[in-house]
Structure formats: C-alpha cells, structure tokens
Amino acid sequence: MTVCGLVTNSREPVPLKSISVGVVVRGFVADVVSELRYHNEEKSPVEVVFVFPLDDEAAVYAFEGLIGGTRIEAQIREKKQAEQEYEDALSEGRQAFLLGREENTSDIFTCSLGNLPPDGEAMLKLSYVQALAPEPDGAIRFVLPAVLNPRYAPQGSEGGNVTKSIPRVPKGTLPYTLSLSAMLESPYGINRVESKCTLEPLRYRAEDRTIAQVSLAEGHQFDRDVELLIYYEDVHKPSALLEAGKPGAAPASLMGDPALLLTLYPSVPAPKPSQKATGEFLFLLDRSGSMECNTEYSSDSPDSPMRIQSAKETLILLLKSLPLGCYFNIYGFGSTYDSFYPQSVEYTQETMSKSLQRVKELQADLGGTEILQPLQAIYSQPCREGYPRQLFVFTDGEVFNTDEVIAEVRRHSSSHRCFSFGIGEGASTALIKGIARAAGGSAEFITGKERMQAKALQSLKKALQPAVTRISLSWDLPPGLKAELVGSGPQVIFQGQRCLIYAQIRGQHQSSGSTEGTVVLQYQFQDQTFKETMKFSLQAQESDRLPVHRLAAQALLQELEGVGEKEKEKQRLALETSLSSGVVCSQTAYVGINTELGKPLQGPLTRRDVPHPYLLPFSAPGGPAVINSVGMSSMSRRLVGGGGPMYMMCSMPVPPVPCSADCMNEIEDTLCSESLCEDVEPTPKKEESPFLNLVSLQNADGSWPLDSDLASILGLSEAEISSKSPAQVALNAWATVLAILWLHINAMEQKDEWELLEAKALSWLHATTGPQLAECVKAGNAMLGSGVSPDVFEI
C-alpha cells in the first residue's frame, strides 16, 4: 500500500510557506490576525489561490499585503468591481491580491495573490473578529478551522463548487506550517486552557490571573482544526462592553456612534412539573458516505467512533427520552432520502420498539449529501395542532447549496424549531448555525472524541421547554442619549443559554448626568411575565480595531442577507453596511494593488492552488490519480486561467486506513479516482456498551422489564433478582429501581445522556409503586452493594 503526496504537474512546490496567527480573546470576543507568507520558487510568475474556511459568524474587516518591502492596504469594494480591478492589474503586470467570500455559503473565503514574480516574496495579513460561544461545561471555544471537506453540490445547482478544485494531501504532508499565539483577558480570572493540539505551558501575565498567554508548540502542521477551550473562573456573569465610535465616521451611523455589547444569561425558570411536555419530534439523519468516517479527524485515533455509529447511538437515547403521547418520525438522507413512516406516528411501546430496531440497522449508504429535498418533504407534511414541531438535523455539513437550504428552513420558521448538529471537523458552520438561527433553535458541533449524545440530549431538553415569548428590551439612559438595537434583537431564549445584544448609543451625553445606563429584558414563559435588569457603564472604551462595531455589523449583515432576492432595499442596506464597516459580505470583496508599474503579461500566469489535508489519508494500489479542477466559482476563476491539473505522486507506505468503502466512494466523486477505493477494509463493528444496552431495554413509558438481558447487565441471574423483590411490588417496578441504581453506580460520567429517560422512569415509578418505593430502593442498594441516596428517587 502507498499513500499519495501532492506535487504540481511541474513538480514545483506550492508557494504558501507558513501561516502565523495572533489572537486576542477578551471575554467572549476573539480578534484574530493571520499572516500568510509566500515565496515563489518557480522560474515564472504565479497566481496563488488559497481557499479556506472561517466560522460563519466571523467578521472579516481588514486585508493588507507587504510586497517587496511596500505595505499595500486593500480596499473593500463591491465584488464585481473588486474582481475587475484585480484582473486589470494582473493584465498590466502589476501585483494584486483579492479576498472574498464564496458564492452560496458564508463560511468559505478565497484569497488570491496574483503576479508573484520568480523568487518573489509576499506577506498577506487578514484580520477578523468573532464572538465565542460557551460549551455545556462552561469552556469558551475558539476554533481556527483548517479542514475544508469537499462540499456536495446537487445536480443543477447554481454557481460552482470551489471545494472540488482544491488539491488534497495526506495528514502530515502539508507544504506549509502554522504558528499561533493567543493573549487571553477576563476580569473574572482564567483557570486553564485545553486543546487537542500540543500547547506550550500557559503563562499568566497578571498576578490575579486575569491576563494569560498560550501558544501552539513549535512545528505544528495545519492539518487539523486548532481548538482552544478556555476556562474562566466565572463564565456565567452578565457583562457589558461599550466601545467608542470610529474617529471621522459619520455621526448617527453604525461606525460613528458608540456600540454596546451586552452578554446576558436569562434565568428562565424550569417548566412547571404539572405540565406534560408534548410535541412532534422529527429526526433528520445524514446517511451519506462520509458518515462512515471517524468523528475525529486524525487517523491515528482508533478509539474515535464512526460518525454514523455515534449518530445511531444518539438516536437511541433520543427515542428513549421522548415523552409518552408525543409524535415522531425519523428521516435519512444522502443522494436520496427515506423515512421510517409516511407521516409522524404516536410514540407508543410498539412504535418505539419498531423504530429502535430500524435505527440499529441504519447504514451510511445513501450516497451524496442532498438535504434540501428531505427538508421540503418534511415541510410538506401538515403540523399537528397542539404538538409543536421540533426538527433535529444531524450532518457532517458537506453541502454547497447552503444559502438555498437555509432559505427553505427560514420559510417555515413560524411552524417549527430546528436544532442542528455538525459532526466531525470541516462541518459547515454556515449550514449548521444558519438553519438553527433561521428556525429559533440551537447549533452544536461534535469533533474529536466528544460525545454527540450529551449535546443532543441537552438540545432535547431545550426542545421540551415551552417557548419563551414576547421578548422585549427597554432602556433607561441619561438625558440626551438613546439606545437603538442593531438588528431585531434576541428572538430566542433558552434556559441557561447566553444571549448577545448589540446596540448603538446615540446622542450626546451630558457631562453632569449619570454615568450608568440600565436595560430591562422582559419575556413571557408559561403565562408568567419575567423581567431581568442590568446596569452598565457609559464610559466608552477606545479601540482602533473596533471589534464590537465589527461584530454588530456582522450580526446586522447576517440578518439582512437572510432575506430573499426580492427585498432590494435590505440588500442595498447590506451593501452600505459592508462598505462602511469593512466587514465582507456576499456583495463585497477586498482588493489590493501594487501601483508600481510592471511589464505586461506575456500569456497567462501559472495558477497554484494551496492544498488542504484529506479528511483521512487514502490508501491506493499505486499510479498517479488526476485531480481535475472543476466547478470553480467566480471568486476562484480568473482571467489567468487554470494552470493545468495537479497530480498525485506515490510515496511512503502506510497501514490500512480506518474508513469504509462507502466513505471512499463518496469522497472519490470530489477528490480521487476509483483506484483509491479498492482493497479498503471496513472498520470492524464495535460491541455496544452495557450502558447503551441498558437504555435499549427501557420501555416507552419509562419502565424496565425484568428479563435475562437486564439480569446480564446487572451481573445477576433473573431468578436471583426475582427472589429479592420486596413483597407486593411488581417485577417491572423492581427492575426499574435496579436499572436507575445501576446508572448511578456505573454511568455517572454520562449523566447528561440519561437524565431525561431517568425522569421518565421516576415519573412512572411514583405513579405505579406508591409507598413501597422507599423499600425497593433500600433492597436494591443492598442487592447491588451500593449506597445511592433515596433523594435520587425523590422520596
């Protein structure tokens, strides 16, 4: 077996040599500057094209170059104008660079550096800012994306698929390196930083631990996402940041006025226990070939589960956690789609058992990734009155018609909530966050060895919460000042979830007045009105990079660009906002030109596409496989032409890869020839855990039957268990008590995954067992040799 490494058809190196990243994280805001160093070692001028992912919510606001000792600041332009200026500059022999967002999606950017002369060097600097979200365990998650998986474009899609044209190399063989240093600041103190990448030791820059610095270890190859999990001492405190406006900007404009960022954690109460949760729960599962790959990008992690297996286990837990009397259905999609039932069915013991068996038999066998058609099929089904529709989408996010999919979800946002899950590195943040944002749900990402199950069950808890309605904000400011929301403000609030609010502070502050402002968040929940009040300082902080203003502009742009083509006024406002703030949107791009005269080009430049890592290393029997440069979008297609194909040349031997033939077949459509998919052994199926086996045995009403399967998990015989049952207690009640005790003894690390099904079991026990429950718990503890508190059983 051999693995393929990439060289150009002239066997010359790719000009990108290194990427250096500096990050400043202040609370929940990350300000990032990336420097890309190029050196052309060829004998002719080249155009270098680097396609890379960014988070959907990142606001790109500056782009500049250092070429031949001359600093060139790029200007933001309307996209067609920027592309024309770039092409004109190249035709005149001048050096130029261009940065813009790809069509059909908001999380892929293309950086082009044209007319880099032989032995020429250049440095391009890209700046962006992004708001960071807390994880369920309180960590603030910063990700520098590296993995850009091929995005599947359905037949007849408009625009090109730029991800297909990117050359790919195996992990560990990228021709460029990455260095990253992050400065962290939090008034509440920094506890620690964790990462799956190797880090240098955390260094505190202040005695109170409010400032710290962390860096990647030397020699890191940018062949996997760089993730920093930052743990503050107190992450759930509300905070406010008022940033002074940009000097010279027009008064009463977004950039001229002070911008306010409020971070709130509304204390939405727990639902009333007397009110039974109900609803229609629809699960849409990606069953494309790439779901056979591991959730963890690195191929040297055999313990990382396959995406499809992790998704199936998650579906089992979700099924077991649904309330009796609700309705549900399960859909699968790839190049085609199917569903368990023609329409949603009532959740009963029969339908649950039947569905459970079908879930266990699911495979990633439906080909490509076409999510639009199954969504349209779901929305064509009428909603059930009194059963709010909740849609759960599980996908590795490898689609290219992202905007079309989000638009479809938004069209039906009034009839459902959407909870989405991005599986594995390279999942599209634009798709995962976009559909959740469009339909009032939440988005989660599962990478590495993270368990999808815990995050999915947290989302189910949100879905079971009654909706928070009538959300409003009121302000109390000193005379002369007025607050105006940027965008429409918060539309969705969940219990324990962070809420970001952006506002402009307009007018003139009277020096003799108060230096504080007050905001009141009001909402209705289960027929009760709640108010939360927060005071904030009106002392605006100066910042030359204006991160709060850029984030406010990005939030407004996301809202404006979410509308249809017919709303021309909002499209015009989006263009104006982008040009005034410097934040790139779908209608704009950055262009920089070295105005020194050059020689007119004699024929086209040679194009060099910067490679990305494979999702997994490929094994092949040998021989070169051609990567065709196909389906480029307008941002990636230039007057300079294609520069010929890139070839895969064989090199060192490697062990068999942990990816099945189905995974290889799908990726072959975009990356490699069929020869790469031969003789690949599928990953052996792992045995189910005792925890999952126990969960699978639970009945729809929450009880467990006493049978040989349960006895085997408990490590006892069925006869022994029956003989120790307290008098006048039904055997299924006795079995249910033992099952709950087993969970507390053996599965506390997975408590987030079984809390809902335990609650269902306890509800059933209280309704059927009565005063004997305390005796059952005592007898169960004695039998299992445990000391689980009776408080667990609410007695």
Image: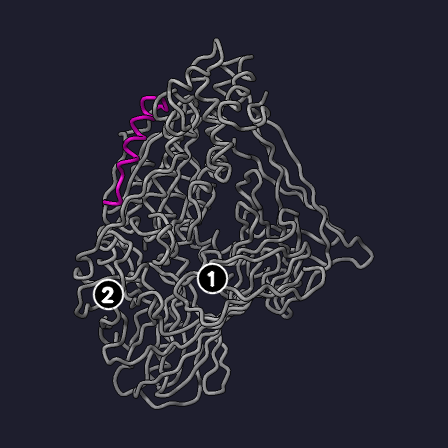
Distance from the alpha carbon under mark 1 to that under mark 2: 33 Å
Give how far across and how far down residue 33 sits, in percent: 52, 69
Label of residue 197 in the image: 1
Mark 2 Cα-neighbour bin, 10 Å: few <14, some 14–19, many ≥20: some
Q: Please, what is the three-letter code of the amino acid marked with disc 2?
A: Val
Q: Toward the viewer: 164 or 563?
A: 164
- Apparent side of residue 639 relative to residue 134 in the rendered image (left or right): left
- Name the disc covering residue 75, or none: none
Residue in the foreground of this view, choosing between 697 and 316: 697
Q: Viewer-proximal residue, 71 or 345?
A: 345
Residue occupying image coordinates x 61% and y 60% = 26
Report the mark closest to the observer, 1 or 2: 1
Q: In which quarter of the image is residue 652?
A: bottom left
Per the picture, the main secondary structure of the magenta-coloured stretch is: helix
Q: For numbered disc 2, what is the local secondary structure?
A: loop
Identify whether 463 is placed above or below 646: above
Residue lying farthest to the top in this orientation? 728
- Please, is residue 171 above or below residue 485 in the view? below
Q: What residue type is labelled 1?
A: Cys
Dot 2 corresponds to which residue? 630
Which structural element holds mark 1?
loop
Q: Position of residue 112 (x, y in %)?
A: 38, 74
Mark positioned earlier in the residue sequence (1 or 2): 1
> Horizontal and vertical percent for residue 290?
29, 51
